[in-house]
Image (cartoon, rainbow, N blue to C red):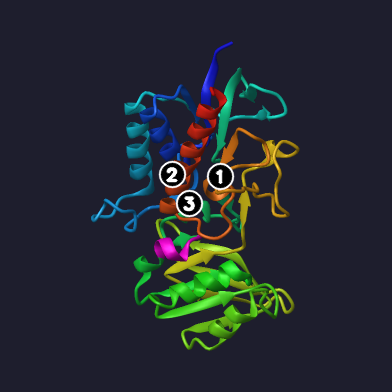
Amino acid sequence: MDIKDIIIIGSGPAGLTAGIYAGRAKLDTLLFTGPVLGSQLMLSGRIEDFPGFPEEITGPELINKMKEQAKKFGIEIIEESVVSVNFQKKPFVVSTNNKKYLAKSVIVVTGASARWLGLENEKRLIGHGISACGVCDGPFFKDKIIGVVGGGDSAVENAIILTKYAKKVFVIHRRNELKASKKLQEEIFNNPKVEFIWDSIISAIKGESYLEGVFVENINTKEKRFLELDGLFVSIGYKPVTDIFQNQLELDDYEYIKVKENTKTSVDGIFAAGDVCDTKYRQAITAAGWGAMALLDADEWLRNLQK
């Protein structure tokens, strides 16, 4: 069976950047896109902070440009999901529903998906008033009224960022106190733009082509009210896409892949980059840079194999 130099699992900015670098390095490379090419970035309606695009670009447009650039350098892209791996033997085994593939090294860039509320209209309105990233989409909500769902560090950080743009920010939390760090709590409690709605959940989302508002329900009194909003930021955490790497790679308590020396995992020859191991930044540009680092590390590792 043909043994690839590198198999890349994932096709977001980290994966496609790794693919571009792999192609330029003349490595025999196979990239699996997963169920959706580009993953989370495909949900971004407008991007204006990715270098090289002074005029805003959509997430799908950016991902497709990266894909074409990777293909230009000759890497093979397969639009399938990897369903299992075996990193306990060499060459490494990567399997889809249809076939098994072998590789000398693997780069894992499967990303992390935002946790959503699971309400009707929610997924349809992502990019049309609903988002999970204040840094990414905050500038589109200047002088608007915004809601943030959650009470942890990411929710509070999103809310603080959004106050730079919004006229008003409502923080909707199912408890009567925040879980965020004390420093963040002190900062947000002293922000005059923020209003808290405690002990409450969002029970329904209103909007057809764009967000119009949400219905908020108090979990104690069951009282409901309609809150008119221009934007809603869901900040109830992220789930790394690491199910197939259980018992294959060392994961942290939140199931993110543990890395050392930037991109090396617990298995020699397996590298990871981007949101699958990034618990802090979660930006397209940082993922892309991390993907380049993973390929450079993998390339060095492969060269040392031949010595």
Q: Residue at x 65, y 23 (%)?
A: 93
**Residue ID for mark 3:** 124
> What's the amino acid at mark 2?
Pro
- Closest to the camera, between mark 1 and mark 2, is 1
- Could you give the CA–CA distance between mark 3 and mark 1, rounded to whole angstroms? 35 Å
Q: Which residues are magenta?
A: 132-137
Q: Residue at x 39, y 24 (%)?
A: 26
Choose top left, top right, bottom left or bottom right for residue 220.
bottom right
Above or below residue 269? Residue 137 is below
**Residue ID for mark 1:** 263
Q: Earlier in the sequence, mark 3 or mark 1?
A: 3
> What's the amino acid at mark 3?
Arg
Q: Earlier in the sequence, mark 3 or mark 2?
A: 2
* Element under disc 2: helix
- Closest to the camera, between mark 3 and mark 2, is 2
Magenta includes 135? yes
Magenta includes 285? no
Q: Tags 3 and 2 in contact by the CB under 8 Å rule?
A: no
Q: Residues within 10 Å of mark 3 (few under 14, many from 20)?
A: some
Q: Tags 3 and 1 in contact by the CB under 8 Å rule?
A: no
How many circles with numbers are drawn on the protein?
3
Q: Residue at x 34, y 44 (%)?
A: 62
Locate residue 51, reporting x and y percent.
31, 53
Q: Main secondary structure of the magenta part?
A: helix
**Residue ID for mark 2:** 13
Task: Name the foreground residue: 94 vs 125.
Answer: 94
